[in-house]
Each structure stands twice: as C-alpha cells, then as structure tokens.
Amino acid sequence: MELSIDDLLAKVRVIARTPRGELLRQIVDLIYERVEQEYDDEPLTPEDLEAIERGREDVNQGRYITLEEYERKGENYRKPLKYTDIFSKMEATLKEESRLSEEDFERNWGIFKNYHYKNDSNDDIFWKLVQVVFYSGMKASIVTSRMPALKKYLYDYKKVKEYDTEFIDNIMNDQSIIRNKAKIDGCVKNAVIFDKIININGSFSNYLESFGDLEGESTLEKLKKDLKQFKFLGPITSYHFMLDLGLKVWKPDRVICRILKRLRLIDNLEDIDQAIRVGREIAVQVELPIRYIDIIFVMYGQIGEEKTLGLKTGICLEKNPRCSICRINEYCTYQN
Ligand code: SF4
C-alpha cells in the first residue's frame, strides 16, 4: 500500500490538536531516533573521523573555540591564545637559526629582560634618551655601529649640557660619529632639560614616579605628554623611550603588526591600539618586560642581517617569509 504523506500529515495534525498530541510526539521521537540509528545512509568516512579528531585537538589546544562557547560569549569574543606558547616558539626558532649557543644568546639578548629604570643611573637614562633620538628615522644598523663613538661625547648629561657651539663644531669633525648636527644640538638641549628635572626631583626615577602608579594607562599617558618637552620626542619616539625605561608600553611598528596580523592577534595592520593591548597581554602572560618581547618580535620580522645574533635575516619577512622553519606556523593564517 502506497503511503500518502499528505494523508498521514493530515491525521497527525488532527491528533496533535487533541489531548493525545503529547503521546504522539513521544512516539514519533522514539521511532525517529531508532530510524536515524538504523538508516544512516551517510556514515562517517575515516577522513571525517580524522577531521573531527583534529578539531577536538584544536579546541583542546586553545586554537579554536566550540560553537557553543562562541554563542555563549558573543560574537566579539576572542579566545585568549596561548601567548606563552607562541612566544617561546618564536624564541626557539630564533635560537635555532642563530649561530649562538644558548648562553651567548642569553648574554646578548637577555639584557633586554632587565630593562628597568630602577636599574639605571641618571646618566644611563640620559644615554637611552640619546639613543632614541639617534635611532629615530635612521637606519638601525648604521646607528648601532656608530653608538660607541657617540657615547664618548653624549653619555654624561652634566658635561653635555655645557657644550657650546665651538665644542659641537669639533664633535662634528669626528668622522666616527653620526654627524647629524640637528640631533647633536637636540641632545645638548635635552641635557639642559634633563638636568632641570634632576634638580627638581632628585633623580629621573623620582620624576617618573611623581606621575603616580606607572602600571596604569592614564599615568603613562600623562608621562608621555610631559616627555614631549624633550627635543625629538614625538608621539612614537616617546613610546620608544618609555619602552627603554622598562615601562609597560609598546608602540608596535609595521614589522610587529605584520606578525600579529598573520597570527590573527589583530584585525588589521592599522589597529595600533589593539596591537598595544596584545603586547601588554603577552608581557603579562610570559612574565617578561615588553622591551624583551619587542626585540624578539623585531628580530623575527626584520629583513637583513643581525650580526650579534648570527642571523642572515629574520623569519617572518614581508615577502617570502621562511614558514618552513617557523615554529609558530600552527597559529598562522598566512598562506605562503
Ligand atoms: S608561518 Fe610564515 S607567515 Fe606565519 S608567522 Fe611563521 S614565518 Fe610568518
């Protein structure tokens, strides 16, 4: 006998409107469950099972969240990635690619873990300010090679503030330095401002702490505004100086943003605020100063040779990134 679906549905509708409707629903559920088990005409293939297993592993590893979790948390929810894992794998890739032993790597680059103004004398801090001035807008490798020569003239702020035009002209004749008169003049003016700050506060550390809790974002903003009194400290260079002081700020450049974007840690390359927040979060999770995190990211994405590290070039380059040796490729969305 041919089963008429329309006839069956008409009868079901009638019963559903009566007190026996609930009994009908239970019977239908029971039969449906059995039919589903017995007549599954699309059983899972080994590939399906493997994909399910991979998905489970991704969820366990924190790379993805389940749909249920996503719906519970809302569409703007971003599951915190395991920054400790990402960061330690970046470090491991750099160590493996460098020609340095573990000890030499630590000796050369571990110094960035100790960047904190409390470890510095006033002259050390002034020297950091001088470096920020010179690195700004200049090729890093050239500045690095000339820094020892510059240090002879620009380390001791009490001497620097006394330099007159004649002395500056003499310095400008020294071929071993970077002969950029505007920057040297700026450093002399900065020495005068620096000296005034020390006279008022007793030390540069006291001056920094006079702004309040240096962990707080609003305090850091106030400090950043005040630092603009120094020559060559604009919005970005102020961040660099604060970073060198060991404060919890990060001004990610294009290289850093590129890596963050490829790892889906920021939505677009222009979202600096999001990149700053991610930097802080990485620092909190890995329990290291942002200065060290910054240098590892920069080395990871920077093109060209890094002699101290023994690297011919970085790993996550803009063009032709070296994904085959990159240990964070499991987190990466970039298609090479
Ligand atoms: S996998 Fe490739 S693109 Fe992704 S972070 Fe590593 S080097 Fe960069």
Image (spheres, rainbow, N blue to C red):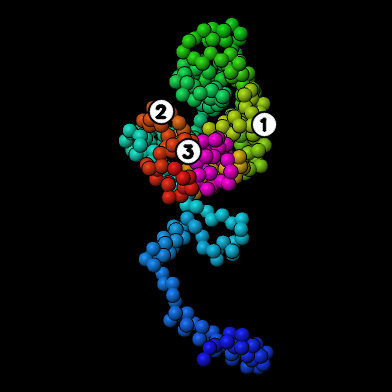
* In the depicted structure, whether residue 184 falls above or below residue 336: above
Would you say residue 279 sits in the magenta stretch?
A: no
Which residue lies at the image location 41% right of the left edge and 28% below the top edge?
A: 305
Q: Which residue is mark 3?
A: 297
Which mark, residue 305?
A: 2
Q: Quadrant of the C terminus?
A: top left
Judging from the image, what secondary structure is the residue with disc 1 in?
helix
Overall secondary structure of the magenta section: loop
Front in this rendered view, residue 225 or 134: 134
Judging from the image, what secondary structure is the residue with disc 2 in?
loop
Q: Residues within 10 Å of mark 1 (few under 14, many from 20)?
A: few
- Number of residue marks: 3
Q: Is residue 32 left or right of residue 13?
A: left
Q: Residues within 10 Å of mark 2 (few under 14, many from 20)?
A: some
Residue 22 rendering spot, x and y as whole percentages: 61, 89
Gap between marks 2 and 1, in whole Å?
36 Å
Residue farthest front in this picture = 2
Which mark, residue 89?
A: none
Residue 43 rendering spot, x and y as whole percentages: 41, 72
Would you say residue 250 sits in the magenta stretch?
A: yes
Q: Nearer the observer, disc 3 or disc 1?
A: 3
Q: Nearer the observer, disc 2 or disc 3?
A: 2
The reply to whether callout 2 and callout 3 are in contact (CB within 8 Å) is no
| Residue 212 in sight here | no
Q: Is mark 1 within 8 Å of ligand 1?
A: no
Q: Is residue 206 left or right of residue 300?
A: right
Gap between marks 2 and 3, in whole Å?
15 Å
